[in-house]
Amino acid sequence: RWTTSSIVDETVQAIRDRVGDRRAICALSGGVDSAVAAALVQRAIGDQLTCVFVDHGLLRAGERAQVERDFVAATGVNLVTVDATEQFVGALEGVADPEEKRKIIGREFIRTFERTARDLVNRGDGDVDFLVQGTLYPDVVESGGGSGAANIKSHHNVGGLPDDLQFSLVEPLRALFKDEVRRVGLELGLPETIVYRQPFPGPGLAIRIIGAVTADRLETLRAADAIAREELGAAGLDREIWQCPVVLLADVRSVGVQGDGRTYGHPVVLRPVSSEDAMTADWTRLPYDVLERISTRITNEVSEVNRVTLDVTSKPPGTIEWE
Ligand code: XMP
């Protein structure tokens, strides 16, 4: 019978058998999946694992600090943080197509891991043979890897991998759904701030800017997102909603009025969803007063945004993210 502790024991043993005394790096995103994958692999091979957190400039406010603080405190892993904002934002310049964005980000992630692995070798840590990723079963299915499934979108860690990848992949969560991953995380002793963190996609804010990614647009979206998260948290709704992407319609402008003046700014979309496993989702009926506070604060505090809209589409037909 599959209990959480038997999943942990068998996975840890399988990782040990496969990796032996060789070295691995783990792509840490700040999200629950990669955190649980890293904690499992660390239990299996200890110091032969180095975690790599890539700050690609597409993160939300405060995320990097949270990984550097909470995750390291909970696990004691070796963590290397890589500053790669210019690399990623540069590679995305002028790109508006969602699949192209995802593939570019997947490719830049891999380049960054390869570079980091070389750095680790150079400092005398020994060759890195394995790359650990927190790929889940739904990621595989939606990227077209499951039996008979269409390619809905290329999850950055599945559809964006190069053919000449220099690592063997270790994906200990590949058969699991999110709720199972959370149980494994608790079993491994990870804190609730990590285990119950709402999902955030690896390609980050890049796939929540509809249009090309620029530093200014990232800053606008980051500010709007921080307000939405703050208000949802203050209203005690964090656990009730699966996640609430804030999407910037960067290529759309709308006329508004503020004081006596005309504004010509951008709309953002709130996309609160309820879900069990992200395969299907319903839009969350957020209380009107919470929506009002979010809307008022975003339009007051983020000068480029003059309109806040609500996405009331379930999945299907809409996916959770807009791209
Ligand atoms: P969709 O938009 O396909 O999203 O309904 C389902 C869940 O997956 C997350 N998501 C991703 N996560 N890399 C990730 O790590 C990705 O490329 C990616 N795309 C979507 C999304 O936030 C939602 O939770």
Image: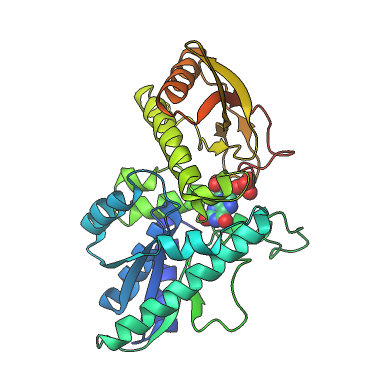
Q: Is residue 215 left or right of residue 209?
A: left
Relative to the observer, which residue lies in front, 96 or 34?
A: 96
**Residue 12 x %, y %:** 39, 71
Extreme front residue here?
Answer: 261
Is the image coloured rainbow, by chain, by secondary structure, or in one colour? rainbow
Q: Is residue 46 visible?
A: yes
Above-or-below relation of 114 to 5: below
Relative to the observer, which residue lies in front, 263 or 58?
A: 263
Above-or-below relation of 22 to 107: below
Q: Is residue 171 left or right of residue 55?
A: right
At horizontal 26% and vertical 56% (from top left) the residue drawn is 68
Above-or-below relation of 320 to 262: below
At horizontal 50% and vertical 62% (from top left) the residue drawn is 90
**Residue 215 x %, y %:** 46, 49
Q: Count how many numbered circles sit on residues in the image.
A: 0
Q: Is residue 277 visible?
A: no
Q: Is residue 248 left or right of residue 223?
A: right
- Asked where in the image residue 54 lies, by quadrant, the reply is bottom left
Relative to the observer, which residue lies in front, 91 or 19?
A: 91
At horizontal 32% and vertical 57% (from top left) the residue drawn is 188
**Residue 134 x %, y %:** 47, 62
At horizontal 63% and vertical 37% (from top left) the residue drawn is 281
- Asked where in the image residue 77 lies, by quadrant, the reply is bottom left
Above-or-below relation of 59 to 269: below
**Residue 297 x %, y %:** 42, 21
